[in-house]
Amino acid sequence: MVETPKDINKNDNLKRPSMHPKQGYFLSKQWGETQRFVIVGKEGNIAQELAARLKKGGKDFIVTSFEPVENDLYLQLEEPQMFNYDKINENDFIVFLAAISSPDVCKNQFDYAYTINVTGTKEFISNCLKNNARLLFISSDTVLGKAEGVVDEKSKPSPFGKYAEMKYEVEKYYEDKPNVKIFRLSYVFSRDDKFSKYVLNCIKKNKKIEIFHPFERRVVYIQDVIDAIIRLSENWDKFSRKIYHVVGPELLSRKDIVELYIRSFYSKTSCKIIDDDNRFFEDRARIINLNSLYIEELLGRKPTKIADAIEKEIIAYKEEL
């Protein structure tokens, strides 16, 4: 997850693009009759994009909610024992996206974050596995955040920060469980992610874009993440590795992303690098060059270049203006 400068407009309601099948992204048509998606953590961008893709394809899925909502599965990870595990079926494909991902919260409210990110998460997953469900645990590139240079699935983990340590603890707990696989994600790009919304809002208002630099990741397009999830669900045995890095093809800084946006909009908006006296980077690695040895196998193609992804997102954005 990405933290943005303090003047980000969190209330910006830029719409998510309606894309997917017509733009050439993978949409499965061969599903096992008994298979159902269970999306844990419905509020995030990945969960919403996955649900939209499944709905468009007429596929069977259900989401969890931390509030009682009709047709959702009520789940509070602070009290996982209250969940009705009879609702989890054999061969359900659970996509576990829920987490407190803010490095600041994980550090400053450690006990609360640990209860959700580790204790509650492990209890929920373990009980679901008793029903012979399959589960994809979404982890983070920060699990290798202390490493220098290029790292891949064979590299030794070196967590950076409390959030990363929590993710790695869960990874280790299920390392010998065949019904659990792990995706480590880098910064997931979409027009609706926090940083992109901040950049687009600045461009719209012709306002200087303030960024921290260097802050570099192997940025991955959200549609590639959705494709990877769906392909894994249908090829669980074929994709036999425990851990996959779901990343983009190149290492990009926030400055690189801003420049791509500015160029695509022919904007006169400028970018300003701000100094945070190392407070922002106290619990965030400046550079994580997370490579993947298996991403092309997982996707069945090369991952999308972010320059191309931005062009797709901007086309959809302009159509909705």
Image (cartoon, helix red, strand yellow):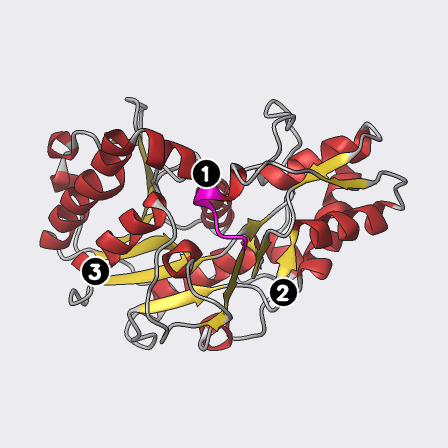
228 and 279: which one is in front?
A: 279
Q: Residue at x 18, y 67 (%)?
A: 178
What crowding class fits label 1: few (fewer than 14 Cα within 10 Å), some (14-19), or many (20 or more)?
few
| Cα–Cα span, label 2 and label 1 | 21 Å
* Quarter of the image where one finds residue 306: bottom right
Residue position marked by numbered label 2 in the rendering: 304
Q: Residue at x 13, y 40 (%)?
A: 85
237 vs 262, left or right, is left
Q: Looking at the rendering, in which quadrant would you find the C terminus? A: top right
Q: Give the extent of the magenta segment.
A: 282-286
Task: Relative to 50, say whether 6 is above or below.
Answer: above
Q: Residue at x 69, y 38 (%)?
A: 274
Image mark count: 3
Mark seen at residue 44: 1
Q: Amino acid at mark 1?
A: Gly
Q: Amino acid at mark 2?
A: Thr
Please state the horizontal and vertical placement of residue 142, each as a whole percent of the image. 41, 54
| Cα–Cα span, label 1 and label 3 | 25 Å
User: Is label 3 in a helix, a strand or a loop?
Assistant: helix
Q: Residue furthest front?
A: 277
* Quarter of the image where one finds residue 13: top right
